[in-house]
Amino acid sequence: MKIVSFEHQGRAGYGVLEGDRIAVAPASGPVDLKAALASGGVAAVMSSGGSIPLSDVTLLPVLPNPGKILCVGHNYEDHRKETGRAKVDHPSIFTRWADTLIAGGRPIVRPRESTDLDYEGELAVVIGKGGRRIPREAALDHVAGYAVANDASVRDWQWHTHQFTPGKNFPDTCALGPWLMTPDELGPLDRQRITTRVNGEVVQDAGFDQMIFSIADIIAYCSGFTTLSPGDVILTGTPGGVGAKRTPPLWLKPGDVVEVTVTGLGVLSNPVAEDASA
């Protein structure tokens, strides 16, 4: 099942994508996808309040308002090596804020403060059942589904100190979508790959079996220090090939198009634009 969040005639909604139409969740139900997951998981989305053409809506980030966005750094061996990071016993975790999220098709914004904008294709995990101190063997039971993400990073601001937060939280720099796919439809993750293209050229390509810490490891670890809640998002790390570690560096510029593909899940495509804010 594919679930989307969208705006239609000035109102936000969500529903199940069926071909080129959306079976809309009824107005009497939970107000948004996060609330639906909290009230009954993906089953709470399945009741239809009618259907509308996909072409009539504007897609939103699949979770527009997650309570938490937890991100894993250096979770592929080739990326760890290209960054010169030492091996570690636990995942490296940093955070994003919800107001950095954009939908597929919307521009990733290069801020005025920097030209060092980099791509990071990632698999996003959406929590469906909350919990604290979740055992590794039960961790995947807490997953509502998966989405594609581009954790675009402003590298010089990321590297001002050892803390990543500034470079990871410029507005409109994290694409999340195009939909949430339930685990039963996606199938075993170790059979899937993630590929990032910039203007059609492959710049990242890896199988999820190359992750240093598995999704179960990450959920178990994160739930050890915080309570995971329905609708929380975990970005599971990016493979090697980032622009910052190329010679010369490959920085994103206005007019570029970045596509992140997860086999079996979908394609997340975003243009890059200059910051036009006041």
Image (cartoon, grey):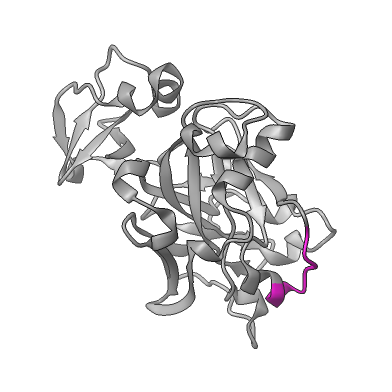
The reply, left or right, for residue 28 in relation to residue 159 is left
Is residue 181 visible in the rendered image? The answer is no
Residue that lies at the very extreme toward the top in this rendered image: 28
Q: Which residues are magenta?
A: 81-88
Quadrant for the N terminus, please.
Answer: top left
The reply, left or right, for residue 38 in relation to residue 168 is left
> In the rendering, at what x and y percent does residue 220 appear?
64, 38
Quarter location, residue 116: bottom right
Magenta-span inclusion, residue 84: yes
Magenta-span inclusion, residue 197: no
> In the rendering, at what x and y percent does residue 228 appear?
60, 30
- The residue positioned 33% from the left and 50% from the top of the image is 186
- The residue positioned 67% from the left and 29% from the top of the image is 133
Which is the main secondary structure of the residues drawn in magenta?
loop
Residue that lies at the very extreme toward the right in this rendered image: 161
The reply, left or right, for residue 237 in relation to residue 222 is left
Q: Is residue 75 above or below residue 240?
A: above
